[in-house]
Image (cartoon, helix red, strand yellow):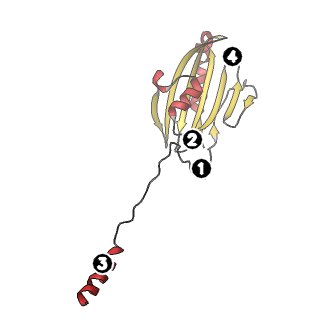
């Protein structure tokens, strides 16, 4: 009887030692930090720039003298979707230059597209932090793109995040 009680007590002690099974769930959506707020975009536009022509939650379109400049803020995570939204092309279809700009990753690219207004040339820069893509793009008719090159260089050099 003592042996039987000892065996039962030992069995009861070992019952609590089973490992607890844990489960991990996976979703297709990236979980964003709830407290992450977009940063302020710093940008210097030429004086002849008109007031913002159109403002949305994601950005602002400025009409300049012969070209347009768009400034946008989008959730990070899918660079291809951001590039496609800006240019209409996927990142595999473009040559994208990737550099580091301080704590951010910087992507720059150019593209051309045939539109109702004729051939257009575009240039874009995306700054990526952990939560957002901050983008600037400029589009002009192909025949005038060369004369805007120096102006665009000044605009893109002033682009930053505070």
Point out the tag, 1 or 3, that comes first from the N-terminus.
3
Residue 49: where, in percent of width, then height? Answer: 72, 25
Q: Residue at coordinates 30% horizontally, 82% vertically from top-left?
A: 8
The quarter of the image holding the C terminus is top right
Q: Is residue 153 left or right of residue 47?
A: left
The quarter of the image holding the N terminus is bottom left
Label 1 near label 2: C-beta < 8 Å? yes
Point out the tag, 2 or 3, that comes first from the N-terminus.
3
Q: Which of the 4 quarters of the picture holds residue 51?
A: top right
Report how far apart the C-alphas of labels 2 and 3 lie in the structure.
Answer: 56 Å
Q: Which of the 4 quarters of the picture holds residue 58?
A: top right
Q: Is residue 23 left or right of residue 161?
A: left
Q: Residue at coordinates 47% horizontally, 26% vertically from top-left?
A: 96
Above-or-below relation of 58 to 13: above
| Circle 4 crowding by C-alpha within 10 Å: few under 14, some 14–19, many from 20 | few
Residue 11 is marked as: 3
Q: Residue at coordinates 55% horizontally, 16% vertically from top-left?
A: 112
Report how far apart the C-alphas of labels 4 and 2 lie in the structure.
Answer: 30 Å
Residue bearing mark 4:
66
Point out the tag, 1 or 4, that comes first from the N-terminus.
1
């Amino acid at each position: 009887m003592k042996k039987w009680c000892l065996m039962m007590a030992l069995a009861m002690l070992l019952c609590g030692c089973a490992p607890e099974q844990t489960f991990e769930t996976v979703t297709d959506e990236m979980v964003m930090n709830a407290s992450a707020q977009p940063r302020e975009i710093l940008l210097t536009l030429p004086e002849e720039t008109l007031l913002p022509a159109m403002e949305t939650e994601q950005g602002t379109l400025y009409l300049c003298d012969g070209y347009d400049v768009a400034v946008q803020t989008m959730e990070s995570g899918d660079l291809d979707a951001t590039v496609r939204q800006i240019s209409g092309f996927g990142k595999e279809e473009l040559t994208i230059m990737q550099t580091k700009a301080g704590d951010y990753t910087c992507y720059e690219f150019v593209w051309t597209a045939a539109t109702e207004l004729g051939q257009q040339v575009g240039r874009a820069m995306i700054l990526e932090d952990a939560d957002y893509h901050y983008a600037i793009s400029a589009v002009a008719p192909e025949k005038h793109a060369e004369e805007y090159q120096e102006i665009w260089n000044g605009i893109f050099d002033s682009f930053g995040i505070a």
